[in-house]
């Protein structure tokens, strides 16, 4: 058991939550200058271009030969393609608050899928911890006066599907970690995301006769800064980190960290946008953090024993 690798995975999980929490700020700034689809295109262009540099110089080795490529393609279809497409269309029919509430249920969906497809077992206390974290997010939104309007069934259904595809990504990436390095999975995901969003965005502008608007945002320094953060930090770094995390810890444990981003985004809003922090924000944050800690600490001994048995089984297969 590599304890150093495990500690690094937890560090990356917290770092991911911080990065995603701040990404809401930069997304708001980027969308002031560009269409959502153009923003996604530039975002993945930045991430793919930066990762292509070490690949081109041979600093990062990639080898897809003899590996289950169709599963990696399925992974890219789930995330980023499926996730961002469903999110964009879902938010056309529903509010961002409804999106936030529904996205909070991702750890629950991940726990269910991980138990079915990966046979990941969670204790009763871990299940309660996951629900505590989810309740913390929902509690904050409800106290802010947000709720789910079931007349927006199309938007709600699409936003719920974002939970399913992200959970599916977490489960599939966990299983693919046996065959691919984090860099190999990430490069494929980012490349497919960039190519797809570029084609769709250009086709959309060409059809509408607005191709010149595709390049207009590049005149804004704020847009460029936002896209660099979203592309290089919030896409490239988090994708590499997430794929590394899923090679070390269970999908159900990693997914609960996504709710930490709610705490970070509130803190970022208070620091940089002057948004108010109330008592219910603090109560919700405590519930979220307690849920994350509980999910990853309770039943840890059993999880370590399972990982040791799995590693021994892998070594036995190699022999």
Image: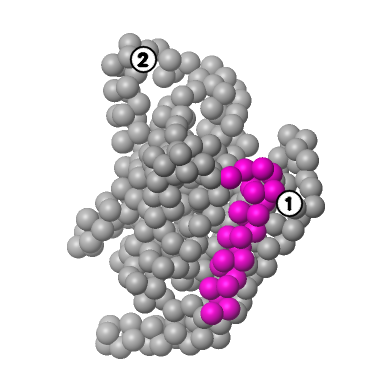
Instruction: Judge by depth and name the residue closer to the eye, 16 or 167.
Output: 167
Instruction: Choose top left, top right, bottom left or bottom right for residue 64.
Output: bottom left
Residue, disc 2: 211
Residue 143: mark in rendering: none
Span of residues in magenta: 124-147
| Residue ID at (55%, 63%) | 256
Residue, disc 1: 281
Position of residue 250 in the picture relative to residue 55 (left or right) = right
| Residue ID at (75%, 38%) | 275
Q: Is residue 125 above or below residue 26?
A: below
Q: Is residue 58 above or below residue 175?
A: above
Residue placed furthest toward the left: 66
Q: Are marks 1 and 2 in contact (CB under 8 Å)?
A: no
| Residue ID at (48%, 78%) | 122
Instruction: Choose top left, top right, bottom left or bottom right for residue 258.
Output: bottom right
**Of the residues under marks 1 and 2, which one precedes in the sequence?**
2
Residue 7 in sight here: no
Q: Residues within 10 Å of mark 2 (few under 14, many from 20)?
A: some
Residue 254 location (% of width, % of height) = 51, 64
Instruction: Judge by depth and name the residue closer to the eye, 102 or 216.
Output: 102
């Amino acid at each position: 058991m590599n304890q150093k690798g495990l500690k690094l995975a937890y560090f990356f999980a917290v770092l991911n939550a911080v990065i995603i929490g701040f990404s809401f700020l930069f997304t708001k700034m980027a969308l002031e200058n560009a269409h959502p689809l153009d923003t996604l295109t530039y975002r993945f262009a930045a991430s793919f271009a930066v990762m292509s540099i070490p690949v081109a110089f041979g600093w990062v080795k990639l080898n897809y030969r003899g590996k289950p490529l169709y599963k990696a393609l399925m992974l890219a279809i789930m995330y980023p393609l499926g996730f961002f497409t469903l999110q964009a269309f879902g938010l056309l029919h529903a509010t961002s608050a409804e999106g936030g509430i529904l996205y909070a249920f991702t750890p629950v969906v991940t726990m269910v899928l991980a138990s079915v497809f990966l046979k990941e077992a969670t204790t009763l206390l871990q299940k309660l911890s996951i629900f505590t974290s989810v309740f913390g997010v929902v509690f904050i939104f409800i106290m802010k006066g947000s709720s789910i309007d079931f007349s927006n069934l199309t938007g709600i259904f699409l936003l719920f599907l974002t939970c399913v595809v992200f959970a599916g990504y977490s489960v599939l990436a966990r299983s693919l970690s046996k065959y691919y390095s984090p860099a190999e999975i990430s490069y494929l995901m980012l490349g497919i995301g960039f190519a797809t969003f570029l084609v769709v965005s250009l086709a959309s502008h060409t059809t509408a006769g607005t191709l010149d608007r595709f390049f207009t945002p590049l005149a804004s320094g704020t847009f460029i800064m936002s896209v660099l953060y979203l592309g290089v930090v919030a896409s490239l770094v988090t994708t590499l980190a997430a794929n590394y995390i899923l090679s070390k810890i269970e999908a159900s444990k990693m997914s609960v960290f996504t709710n930490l981003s709610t705490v970070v985004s509130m803190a970022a809003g208070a620091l940089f946008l002057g948004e108010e922090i109330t008592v219910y924000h603090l109560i919700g944050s405590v519930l979220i953090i307690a849920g994350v800690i509980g999910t990853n600490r309770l039943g840890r001994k059993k999880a370590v024993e399972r990982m040791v048995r799995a590693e021994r089984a892998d070594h036995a297969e190699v022999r």
